[in-house]
Image (spheres, coloured by chain):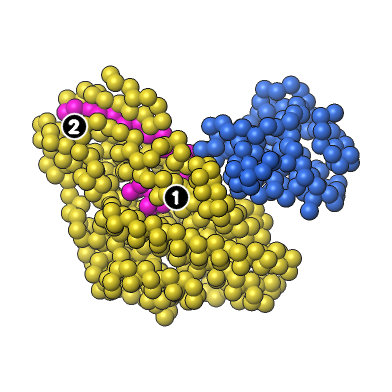
Chain colours: A yellow, B blue
Amino acid sequence: MSTSGQDKPSSGTSRRIAIDPVTRVEGHGRITLLLDQDNHVQQARFHIVEFRGFEKFIQGRPYWEVPFIVQRLCGICPVSHQLAAAKAMDQLVGVDQLTPTATKLRRLLHFGQILQSHALHFFHLSAPDLLFGFGSDPLRRNIVGILEKYPEIGLKGVKLRKYGQQIIAAVTGKRIHGAATIPGGMNKSLTLTERDALLAEIEAIVSWSLDGIALNEHIHVAHPEHRHFATLHTPFLSMIGSNGELEFYHGGLRASSATGEKIFDQFDYRHYHQIIHEEVRSWSYMKFPFLTALGPTEGWYRVGPLARVNNCDTISTPLAEAARKRFMEYGQGCFVHDTLAYHWARMIEMLHCAESIHALLLNKEITGSELLVPKGLKQEEGIGVIEAPRGTLFHHYRVNEEGLITQANLIVSTTSNNQAMNESVRVVANTYLDSQEITEALLNHLEVAVRAYDPCLSCATHALGKMPLQVELIDSNGMLLDRYLSGQEKDNN
Amino acid sequence: MPRLLLFGYGNPGRGDDALGPNLIDHISLLGFSHVECQSDMQLQIEHVMDVARCYQALFIDADLSCAEPFIYSKVVAEKDRSYSTHAMTPSTLLHVYQEVYRQAAPQTFLLRIRGYHFELGATLSNRANANLDAAVKFVSRLCEMDNLKIL
């Protein structure tokens, strides 16, 4: 890795800057920077200070409730949590193979979820930074600004997200927090009418997804400075298909070093605790997972679109595979580590989802009525892992004889990217924080770094266009030197 | 293409906040072929695409402070601060519509039904239920006329 992950020792003349809260992330977060007298960053931390407690309060609940409880973790990726939990529930009831129709419905649901989430993240949240500039007018840096300046791009984003929501609604009955999965299968068929309605729009969705890739490819290649912005050289972790292909729903785990060597491959995720350990730190409610083989200092890794597109050998759909090859050519045969290339990789995945949805809708099994398999021998432990939009998602449950949850452990995607987000904030702060004057543009540079990871904190703060950031400059004696609230006049105390 | 869009919004799990979706449930049962019924927790940008499919639109929301049993008014496109949140106002949604489609939005109205209690997990209060009954009769009449207008 190119960065140490270690804090420098603080001097007596250091001062601390706190960005609190960081928004446009799901939940509440905070960035703190500790600077020395020459403005060198001695410490940079991205704190997730919200405490959710799902792992605790589902204890004692019957197992079949779990997929619908845990999807309340998030308003953007509830489907991901429902599916990961559902896979674990399948194991608890002794089912290891669903019917072809149930498997396809779950995959369709998953592709729809990733498509809408990726569209939301790029077009609504990140495109304003990338199209207007990191330091552009904050009043314009939002989705409405995009619709005003680039209506064609904005409309495609809105329609892409809407289409993903339509798929979720068709499969689960609701756009958000629907109930479709049950242990051993699904509880609702896709009707011919629903299928035909989705098919009617899919060619446009594929076309707009292609446009999304072209736009991101152009932005990234045309701005050489993006290559180094918040860039880290890290291992990547992702699920992989049996032939090394990009896989979101079911497969083995692959971890690669920053230079591309396999750390492990096709690893059975039910034994994930052998390869991943979690560290707890006093200043954050988020855990810090690391690859056991590399240890806590060197073993942190990245997940999500950048990890998946780098890690896979191929993509099973032709247009996305062609896009992946161009992506890898950009990396000249090496992994692409540019943090802002997360956006490019995200669009490649969105195209893969669109192509896969098209193929599934054309498969006659998608409207089948065989949705359930008989339950098998009950198990005491279930572990479901999928690739959520933001990365590998682990759900691990134990139940007692009555089927009540006795233990739960979740490793959500953003948790896996926790250390990387911290490091990216450090890199950006070191590069751009060269003055005591705190500007909105500087704040947004830090936010752009965090935002590239699409941390799963986005639904709770209710701010799409502009982060309501508060930055305080405090001297080493704790005296407030300067305060700035993004979107308001600076308050000089 | 349906001529009228009825769009109720609110959280069905928060007491009287369910008034909008509940009204949609009632009207759906009446089977108007020219009326499209939609509901969601909140208004978001992608709902402009629902508006684009109709000739006129009516949004239905719960309101903690309006006169009983409901207030019916016309909506004018206007950009307010809600554009940067998860919960847009109908006015801002129409503003976004005009930015997206580069044309005037369909004639749009808002029905605010008076609610009183919005606690998590609560059901509709008795007084809100009475207001809902009145609102259902009113909206049914609008649908029968096939024309949303200030009566």
Residue located at (55% from left, 53% from top) = A152
Camera-nearest residue between A417 and B87: B87
Does residue A465 belong to the magenta stretch?
yes
Residue A332 is situated, as x and y percent measured from the top left of the image, at 28, 71
Q: Chain of mark 1?
A: A
Circle 2 chain: A
Disc 2 target residue: A15
Q: Which tag, 1 or 2, sits closer to the chain's start?
A: 2
Tell me where residue A262 sits by quadrant: bottom left
Magenta segment boundaries in residue numbering: A447-476
Q: Element at badge 2?
A: strand
What residue is shown with label 1?
A127
Residue A393: x, y in percent? Answer: 43, 60
Please tell me whether residue A154 belongs to the stretch shown in magenta.
no
- The residue lying toward the viewer, choosing from B38 and A330, is A330
Question: Quarter of the image containing the C terminus of chain A?
Answer: top left
Give the percent coordinates (x, y) of residue B118: 63, 31
Q: CA distance from mark 1 to mark 2?
A: 33 Å
